[in-house]
């Protein structure tokens, strides 16, 4: 091997080494983005589960209030029938008092703004929890898609180092940019894109 060929081979090795360092830095940046996307995804998934449980609990409480309200209202309606048949005034007054109490209780079961535990308030709170759940799930889907893009980008960049095919590094970079874009959409506008059938 001549000195010229040795110099040319050393230059190629140095050039390849420089390219590999750049690709290794690209992999490190993509891995950082992947870690961020995975962390955001796990947080969104946890939030979605939490809000789903909250919504279910609120709807169960709503149902319990509905059953109680129906029971009390039925008792009041039956007492109204008995009121018509009552002969003496004392019995009628006692029945009317009981009917009024049951109707007041039924009204409290329907709406109780002071505690937020009337049917109307429970339904509103449950719907808010469902909205928060849906938002968290939309974020989660974006973060999962971004994580997949980052993972594929890391594989392609690694393949570029092994094979020396620089096009793979460029494709990797483009995938990483796409992943970063999907992550940003998940963070700031998760309902802008309708991904994965939602």
Image (cartoon, rainbow, N blue to C red):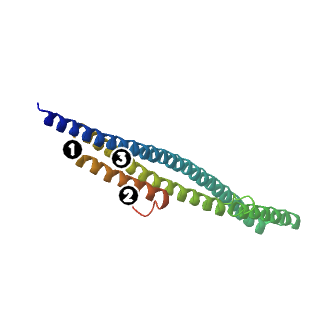
Residue under label 1, please give it.
165
Occupied quadrant, residue 124? bottom right
Local crowd at mark 1 within 10 Å, few (<14), some, or many (≥20)?
few
Q: Residue 54's spot in the image, x, y percent?
A: 59, 50
Residue depicted at x 81% and y 66%: 96
Placement of 167 over or under 20, stated as above or below = below
Residue under label 2, please give it.
195
Q: Earlier in the sequence, mark 2 or mark 3?
A: 3
Q: Secondary structure at mark 2?
A: loop
Q: Nearer the viewer, residue 22 or 138?
A: 22
Placement of 142 over or under 164, stated as above or below = below
Q: Nearer the viewer, residue 26 or 58?
A: 26
**How far, Cα to Cα, is label 2 from label 1?**
32 Å
Q: Is residue 163 visible?
A: no
Q: Is residue 5 left or right of residue 162?
A: left
Residue depicted at x 45% and y 43%: 35
**How far, Cα to Cα, is label 1 from label 3?**
22 Å
**How far, Cα to Cα, is label 2 from label 3?**
14 Å
């Amino acid at each position: 091997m001549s000195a010229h060929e040795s110099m040319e081979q050393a230059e190629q090795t140095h050039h390849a080494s420089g390219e590999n360092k750049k690709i290794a830095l690209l992999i490190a940046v993509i891995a950082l983005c992947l870690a961020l996307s995975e962390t955001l995804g796990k947080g969104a998934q946890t939030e979605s589960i939490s809000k789903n449980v909250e919504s279910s609990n609120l709807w169960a409480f709503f149902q319990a209030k509905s059953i109680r309200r129906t029971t009390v209202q039925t008792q009041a309606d039956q007492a109204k029938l008995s009121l018509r048949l009552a002969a003496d005034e004392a019995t009628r007054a006692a029945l009317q008092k009981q009917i009024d109490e049951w109707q007041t209780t039924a009204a409290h079961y329907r709406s109780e703004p002071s505690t937020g535990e009337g049917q109307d308030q429970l339904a509103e709170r449950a719907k808010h929890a469902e909205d928060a759940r849906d938002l968290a799930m939309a974020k989660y889907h974006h973060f999962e898609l971004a994580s997949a893009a980052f993972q594929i980008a890391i594989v392609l960049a690694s393949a570029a180092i092994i094979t020396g095919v620089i096009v793979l590094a460029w494709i990797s970079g483009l995938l990483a940019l796409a992943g970063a874009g999907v992550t940003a959409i998940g963070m700031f506008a998760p309902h802008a894109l309708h991904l994965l059938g939602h």
